Image (cartoon, rainbow, N blue to C red):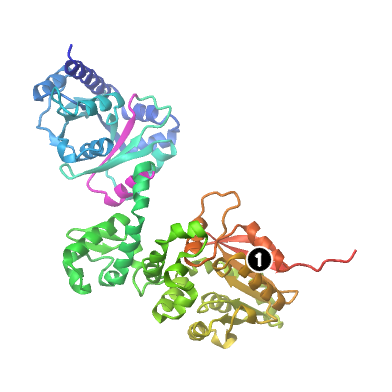
């Protein structure tokens, strides 16, 4: 028997087994075998919402006659001609590094009858592989691995909430995303999962089929699938610079302001509004759709919630941050290797001065920086309720005035929150002259300017006599020597009863993954500072006669560190 004949015989046996499975099994039994951990309630929830609809496999007939013979041998007859299978063709192309256009995968759906007389289908994916074809090796690998063999369940009356619930249930029992796609020839969305360990259904994969196009859900599903593919993950990481620049260009051109969250606008309309090339803008919007920044809608695009944050007038706008990250910080990150090699900030080497001095010389950059700092102020939300702040406010309300001193407090966002939440408190903000002027305007506009004083000065000018001192995202700007100097100035000005609240991101002591790791690299490359562990900060505090009391979580992976003056040592 030739290799081709033997392969065809193997395909025929697999096809007979698939057809037999479709004829004999019911939905509940198959789901129980596929997901052995299901309890009765979960099994009922699944069987109420989806039904076993088909078995599927991929075969490699040498020609059309051989395919008809395979079908007949399994008691199957195809009523219609094969349709193109977009999803399987793309999966084969990715797995084997081939051009999808050269893989003409067809799909046939001969019908069978289930045990209760219900209509079932055997999905037969067919890729013709003639004798001597260069596809023979691909066919042998696929035949052995059975990557496309699966049990298909059709979701009845699908909606996004239902589909997400079903996906979550499969995930909870060990089924993992394994690709999927939308087939425009059938107007159906396919979500593939690998069957969990311990599955006893005889098929390595599960398919959920939902009639219609469910673009957002499919995007989420494919993102979870790609997260488990090393080459895919690395490729996306390597192209991260494209993402930064795409978002920066989108913001710089003012495209978010020209878009609407409900009414789609075409690339041509948007290009005319912002002065851009229509075809290139369409390319940018297609990429931003992949990122979830915009939403394709017919021939146009709508602004997604993430994209709305890039509007200049959005509450908590991230537009200033996108322009900084795609602008000066993007340029200096190109010198990261030099920073790693020498420990010196790439920003200083590129621009000839540190970023504080450089931004101070450029009003536009200075404004962007101040506004970008304000964009992440959600981390301040819990601070008005911090025990130290509440205690100071209570004492002040009882007739013992208390003052909050914010060092390098920017334009006053944090101080205004504390003063607005606690009308009995007073405040002092210390900043560079040009920033102190902006802080006065901000605090006046916030309605607390009458209780706040803005002073121009440096860390050597820490106002004495305060009750609560604030250092928010300051220490990570500096190396250890400068931090010790700042803290000594602060300790000298603090009364014995005063408290210090420090807001920073902390590197985990055990080295576990954290957002602070990214900021640590950013600080070293662009500022010359660094993020630190709680233990590292405790040592810096101790060197200045201070001690770390505790630290508590804040939004955006930040922490608030409560620090007090160390008690005086007692003589023996």
Vertical comparison of 433 with 311: above or below: below
> Does residue 207 belong to the magenta stretch?
yes
Image coords of residue 402 (percent x, y): 67, 80
Packing grade of label 1 (10 A; few <14, some 14-19, many >=20) is: many
Residue 401 in view of the camera: yes
Range of residues picked out in magenta: 202-227
Residue 299 magenta-highlighted: no
Nearest the viewer among 511 and 163 is: 511
Give the residue displayed 26% in from the left and 68% down from the top: 260
**Furthest-right residue in this view:** 572
Residue 399 position in % (x across, y down) = 71, 83
**SS of the residue at dot 1?**
strand
- Write down the quadrant of residue 310 in the picture: bottom left
The N terminus - image quarter: top left
Instruction: Identify the residue under disc 1.
Output: 562
For the question of whether residue 381 can be seen, the reply is no
């Amino acid at each position: 028997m030739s290799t081709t004949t033997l392969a065809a015989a193997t395909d025929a046996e697999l096809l007979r087994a698939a057809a037999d499975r479709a004829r004999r099994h019911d939905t509940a039994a198959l789901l129980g075998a596929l997901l052995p951990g299901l309890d009765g309630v979960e099994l009922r929830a699944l069987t109420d919402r989806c039904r076993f609809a088909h078995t599927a496999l991929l075969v490699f007939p040498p020609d059309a006659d051989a395919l008809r013979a395979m079908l007949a041998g399994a008691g199957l007859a195809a009523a219609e001609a094969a349709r193109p299978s977009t999803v399987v063709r793309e999966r084969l192309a990715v797995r084997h590094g081939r051009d999808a256009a050269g893989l003409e995968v067809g799909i046939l759906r001969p019908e069978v009858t289930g045990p209760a007389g219900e209509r079932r289908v055997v999905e037969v994916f067919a890729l013709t592989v003639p004798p001597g074809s260069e596809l023979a090796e691909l066919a042998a690998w696929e035949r052995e691995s059975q990557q496309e063999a699966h049990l298909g369940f059709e979701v009845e009356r699908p909606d996004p909430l239902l589909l997400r619930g079903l996906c979550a249930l499969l995930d909870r029992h060990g089924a993992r995303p394994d690709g999927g796609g939308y087939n425009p020839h059938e107007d159906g969305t396919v979500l593939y999962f690998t069957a969990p360990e311990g599955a006893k259904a005889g098929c390595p994969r599960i398919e959920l089929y939902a009639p219609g196009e469910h673009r957002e859900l499919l995007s989420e599903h494919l993102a979870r699938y790609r997260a488990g593919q090393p080459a895919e993950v690395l490729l996306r990481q390597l192209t991260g610079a494209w993402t930064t620049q795409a978002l920066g260009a989108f913001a710089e051109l003012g495209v978010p302001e020209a878009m609407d969250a409900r009414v789609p606008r075409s690339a041509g309309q948007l290009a005319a509004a912002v002065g851009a090339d229509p075809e290139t803008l369409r390319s940018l919007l297609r990429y931003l759709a992949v990122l979830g920044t915009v939403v394709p809608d017919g021939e146009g695009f709508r602004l997604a919630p993430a994209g709305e944050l890039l509007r200049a007038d959005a509450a908590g706008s991230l537009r200033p941050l996108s322009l900084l990250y795609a602008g000066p910080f993007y340029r200096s990150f190109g010198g990261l290797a030099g920073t790693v090699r020498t420990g010196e900030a790439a920003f200083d080497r590129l621009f000839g001065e540190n970023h504080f001095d450089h931004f101070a010389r450029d009003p536009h950059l200075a404004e962007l920086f101040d506004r970008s700092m304000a964009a992440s102020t959600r981390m301040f939300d819990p601070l008005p309720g911090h025990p130290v702040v509440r205690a100071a406010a209570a004492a002040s309300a009882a007739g013992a005035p208390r003052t909050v001193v914010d060092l390098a407090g920017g334009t006053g966002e944090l101080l205004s929150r504390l003063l607005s939440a606690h009308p009995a408190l007073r405040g002092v903000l210390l900043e560079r002259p040009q920033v102190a002027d902006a802080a006065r305007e901000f605090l006046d506009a916030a309605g607390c300017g009458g209780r706040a004083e803005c002073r121009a000065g440096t860390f050597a000018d820490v106002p004495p006599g305060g009750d609560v001192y604030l250092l928010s995202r300051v220490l990570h700007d500096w190396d250890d020597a400068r931090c010790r100097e700042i803290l000594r100035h602060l300790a000298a000005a603090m009364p014995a009863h005063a408290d210090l609240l420090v807001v920073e991101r902390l590197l985990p002591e055990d080295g576990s993954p954290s957002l602070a790791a990214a900021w640590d690299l950013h600080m070293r490359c662009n500022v010359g500072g660094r993020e630190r562990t709680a233990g590292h900060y405790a040592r810096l505090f101790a060197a200045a006669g201070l001690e770390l009391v505790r630290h508590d979580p804040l939004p955006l992976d930040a922490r608030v560190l409560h620090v007090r003056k160390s008690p005086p040592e007692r003589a023996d």
